[in-house]
Image (spheres, rainbow, N blue to C red):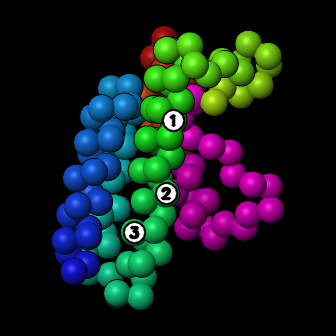
Amino acid sequence: MMASRAISLYRSLLRAHRKHLPPEMQQLGDAYLRSEFKLHKSAKPEHLEGFFTEWEKYLDQILMTARAQESVSAGTLEDTSRQGRRPVFQYGKDLPHDVELSDEQIAQLEKLREETSKADGGPNSGVK
C-alpha cells in the first residue's frame, strides 16, 4: 500500500513539474524530489504519513498556481501584481514568522537557496 502510494505520488509530482514549472525550476524540483523519495525509501511507516502529506500539499500548491496562471491568461482572474501585491500565480509561498526550524531544516533551506540562486542567475550563481 505505501509503495503504491509513493509511486503514484512521485509520478504525479514529476508530471506536474514537467507540465507547469519553468525548465530551471523543473530540473531543481526533479532532483530534490528524487533525492527525498530515495532517502525515505527505508523510512519507518510512522514517518511516511507526514512525508506523503507534505508532498501532497506541495502538489496541490503547484496545481493551484497553474490553475491561477491559466485564469489570469484567460482574463477570468485579476493579476494582483499590478496593485503592488504578490501575484496569485507565483510559485512557492512564504513561511509563517512563527515557524520554528531545526538546524537540519535551516541547513537544507540554505542549500536550496544556493541552488535556486545558481538556477536563476542570482548573485551566487557565478553567472556574470
Magenta run includes residue 85: no
Q: In which quadrant is the N terminus drawn? A: bottom left
Image location of residue 94, percent across then percent down: 68, 45
Residue under the point 56% across and 58% down: 107
Image location of residue 56, percent across then percent down: 42, 59
- Report the side of 99 relative to 107 (left or right): right
Sort mark 1 into few (<14), some (14-19) or many (20+) by Cα contacts within 10 Å: some
Identify the disc placed on residue 52. 3
- Report the side of 106 relative to 4 (left or right): right
Identify the disc placed on residue 110. none
The image shows residue 66, relative to residue 12, as above or below, that is above
Helix, strand or loop for disc 2:
helix
Which residue is labeled 1 in the image?
Answer: 65
Q: Give 27 or 115, whichever is nearer the viewer.
A: 27
The image shows residue 98, relative to residue 93, as above or below, that is below
Helix, strand or loop for disc 3:
helix
Residue under the point 32% across and 41% down: 16
Query: Decide: marks 1, 3 in contact (CB < 8 A)?
Result: no
Q: Main secondary structure of the magenta part?
A: loop
Q: Distance between the residues labelled 2 and 1?
A: 12 Å
Magenta run includes residue 96: yes
Q: How far apart are marks 3 and 2 (CA)?
A: 9 Å
Q: Distance between the residues labelled 1 and 3?
A: 20 Å
Toward which corner of the image does residue 29 lie, by quadrant? top left
The amino acid type found where label 3 is placed reads Phe
Which residue is labeled 2 in the image?
Answer: 57
Specify which label sits upstream in the sequence, 3 or 2: 3
Specify which label sits upstream in the sequence, 2 or 1: 2
Magenta highlight range:
89-111
* Residue 125 seen in render: no
The amino acid type found where label 2 is placed reads Lys
